[in-house]
Image (tube, grey):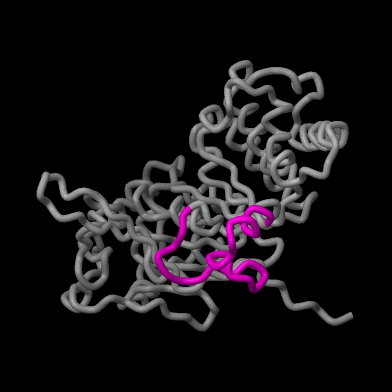
Amino acid sequence: MMNQTPVNLLEIRNVKKTFSISGGGFLSRPLTLTALEDINFTIRKGETLGIVGESGSGKSTLGRCILQLLSPDQGQVLWLGQDLTKLPAEEMRRRRQDLQIIFQDPLASLNPRMTVGEIIADPLRTLRPELSKEQRRERVLKTMAAVGLLPEMINRYPHEFSGGQAQRIGIARALVTEPKLIVCDEPVSALDVSIQAQILNLLAELKDAFGLTLIFISHNLSVVRHVSDRILVLYLGRIVELATGDEIYLDPRHPYTRALLTAVPIPDPKLARKRSIDGLKGEIPSPINPPSGCTFRTRCRFAEAQCAETRPPLETLESGRLVACLRWREIEAAEPIAGSA
């Protein structure tokens, strides 16, 4: 039997998103904040794509543009070849059965006045109105079991649950419509480390059991590595690197990726000290007035004069990975990051 070519569920083409914000004074002109610029990538069926970057890099904005919770200023969001940005509201509402999201703060994302059963069933009432009350209840119970919630919890309220249990409710709410793609927007960042591992393992199990495709957003590269097939690195709203998890961890080509890796904790203090040379320096620049040329140059130990003059294009390397750096060849030859293997 011939191998089938993986199906691209989602294709992002030249997406840009800006926000107009107040200049701070009564007569000040509005300022433009560029949250995303020139974003291009695809997601294959059954894949988990990790998206990483510091706060302010545009991760959550990108997730919301994919789901059309925010409308891009320009570009296309192609779902199975159909541009979601052009769909009428009613048609987009029907598409939401296939596109769901898990939020960062589990308790804040749940309505405290609704029971667990009502919360999980809520998407069904909106997106599957043809289902009877009994059919909705049956599907809710089945989904609760899939995420590790007991049937007797169906009439309890969110405040009666721990953070980990509340996130299982949020996962069940996203899963109940039987979606094809779920955007996981930092779903474990508000949880204890031991609970994080449980939720990550649960997401991996659900992905296999239900044939899901996932977008996993996080600022933590060690968390993303645990669940992702490929990893997309964002900096100030632009893609700086896109590669497999092993390529990112064992052979990063962008200095920002190298710097993020130094933030992954390791137990050996000697190795940790060796990492300091690649650590991030200073704060992320303002997206209202980003640096010229390469936006990472103000924090980059590899930067030189040309980096201030030329914005690096997103190049496709021989392995198929993408990198936006004028000096990636020098970085390729640089010493490996201690403890990253």
On the image, the x and y values in percent for residue 103 come to 54, 40
Which x, y percent locates residue 341?
Answer: 51, 57
Q: In the image, 323: left or right of 303?
A: right
Residue at 26% across, 70% down: 294
Residues drawn in magenta:
70-94
**Vertical side of 43 occupied by 130: above or below:** above
The reply to whether the magenta stretch includes residue 58 is no
211 or 69: nearer the viewer: 69
The x, y position of residue 136, in whole percent, is 81, 36
Q: Which residue sits at x=71%, y=56%?
A: 180
Q: Is residue 36 left or right of residue 120?
A: left
Residue under the point 44% across and 62% down = 72
- Quarter of the N terminus within the rendering: bottom right
- 87 within the magenta span: yes
Q: Residue at x 62, y 58 (%)?
A: 92
Q: Quadrant of residue 152?
A: top right
Residue 331, located in which quarter of the rendered image?
Answer: bottom left
* Count of picture labels: 0
Residue 286 versus residue 175 in the image, above or below: below
Foreground: 29 or 141? Answer: 29
